[in-house]
Every structure is written in structure tokens, then in C-alpha cells.
């Protein structure tokens, strides 16, 4: 949707809706805004954060504005400096305790992310929209809630996704 917005200079500008939140996301913030929040929490500039992730500063900007999503290798590098990858991907921080808390191991989280990347592509091989990938991610995470001690390998997650989607 488009709409009018007043800029800092007082002029009316059109809002393309590019940064509006997709429906059905776990958190009211987008992945890009959570990424920026984590970068700022660690006190790093976009250039410094990009260096850690092994990408250019412009790519970091693209991630933070939700134009494109990063790959697993990038997230693994950020995890090494204390980035809360669960928060980035799921949209909620791990709570100390609680009945609705979902604890997902880091290897399982990476496997879920890989499965979403594998399954959420169109017929041309292009990634599906972020909101679709986020819903698949949520679905897999929730399906693991009662299976915390069971196998969370790539093959078992593929099977679970096939079971959930009926494919």
C-alpha cells in the first residue's frame, strides 16, 4: 500500500510500503530492523558489521532494509561475535523460563534455515518472498517444540516439512 508521509523537511512524500511489515511475522519488527538492532547493541558500524559477516557495506545495508536476506554462512560469522541469531531469525529472544518458550539448538536452527532456503523457492529457483519463508520457518520451529530430544538433522526436517505441507 502507498500513503502520504511527512518528511523531516515538512514536505509530503509517498510511502511505497517497501519497509512495511509483512503479515504473519513473529515479531512486529522486520528481520532487517532486528539485524540493525543487534549491530547497534554491539556498538558496531555497518562497515564493521559487514566485515565480520564477510560482505560489503552496501550488502549490509541491503540486509538491514529487507531487500535481500543473508545466507547461513553470514549468520554463523555474526554468531561468533555475540549476535543473537535466534532473535534475528525467529523474532524473539530466548527467555530464561516459561511454558511457551521454544529452545532450539544452534545446529537445529541452522538446519531449519537451510531447509527453508531449500524448499522456499519458486519454479525458476528464485527465493519466495520473505513473509513466506518466515511462515515456513515458524512452522518448522513450532513442529520441534514437542520433539526437543529427537533428531533435528536435515533429513528429519525435510521429512517433517513434507509431512506438514502434504508433499
Image (tube, rainbow, N blue to C red):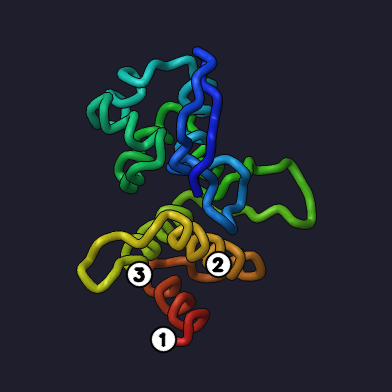
The residue where tag 3 is placed is: 119
Mark 3 / mark 2, whichever is N-terminal: 3
> Closer to the camera, 49 or 19?
19
State the SS at label 1. loop
Q: Residue at x 24, y 31 (%)?
A: 55
Q: Relative to 143, is 87 above or below?
A: above
Q: Are marks 3 and 2 in contact (CB under 8 Å)?
A: no
| Element on which disc 3 rests | helix
Q: Callout 2: helix, strand or loop?
A: helix
Q: Which residue is mark 1?
A: 167
Return the residue at label 2.
139
Relative placement, left or right, of 82 versus 103 is left
The reply to whether discs 2 and 1 touch (Cβ–Cβ < 8 Å) is no
Q: Would you call the spot at circle 1 few (<14 residues within 10 Å), some (14-19), or many (20 or more)?
A: few
Q: CA distance from mark 3 to mark 2?
A: 13 Å
10 Å crowding of disc 2: few (<14), some (14-19), many (20+): some
Q: Position of residue 19 (x, y in %)?
A: 47, 40
State the count of labels: 3
Name which of mark 3 and mark 1 comes first in the sequence.
3
Amino acid at each position: 500500500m502507498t500513503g502520504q508521509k511527512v518528511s523531516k523537511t515538512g514536505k509530503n512524500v509517498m510511502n511505497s510500503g517497501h519497509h512495511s511489515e509483512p503479515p504473519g511475522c513473529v515479531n512486529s519488527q522486520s528481520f532487517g530492523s532486528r539485524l540493525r538492532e543487534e549491530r547497534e547493541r554491539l556498538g558496531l558500524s555497518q562497515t564493521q558489521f559487514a566485515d565480520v559477516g564477510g560482505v560489503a557495506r552496501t550488502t549490509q545495508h541491503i540486509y538491514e532494509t529487507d531487500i535481500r536476506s543473508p545466507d547461513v554462512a553470514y549468520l554463523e560469522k555474526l554468531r561468533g561475535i555475540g549476535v543473537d541469531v535466534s532473535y534475528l531469525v525467529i523474532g524473539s529472544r530466548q527467555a530464561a523460563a516459561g511454558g511457551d518458550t521454544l529452545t532450539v539448538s544452534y545446529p537445529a536452527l541452522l538446519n531449519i534455515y537451510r531447509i527453508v532456503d531449500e524448499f522456499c523457492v519458486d519454479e525458476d529457483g528464485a527465493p519466495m518472498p520473505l513473509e513466506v519463508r518466515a511462515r515456513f520457518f515458524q512452522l518448522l520451529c513450532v513442529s520441534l517444540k514437542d520433539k526437543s530430544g529427537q533428531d533435528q538433522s536435515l533429513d528429519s526436517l525435510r521429512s517433517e516439512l513434507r509431512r506438514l505441507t502434504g508433499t
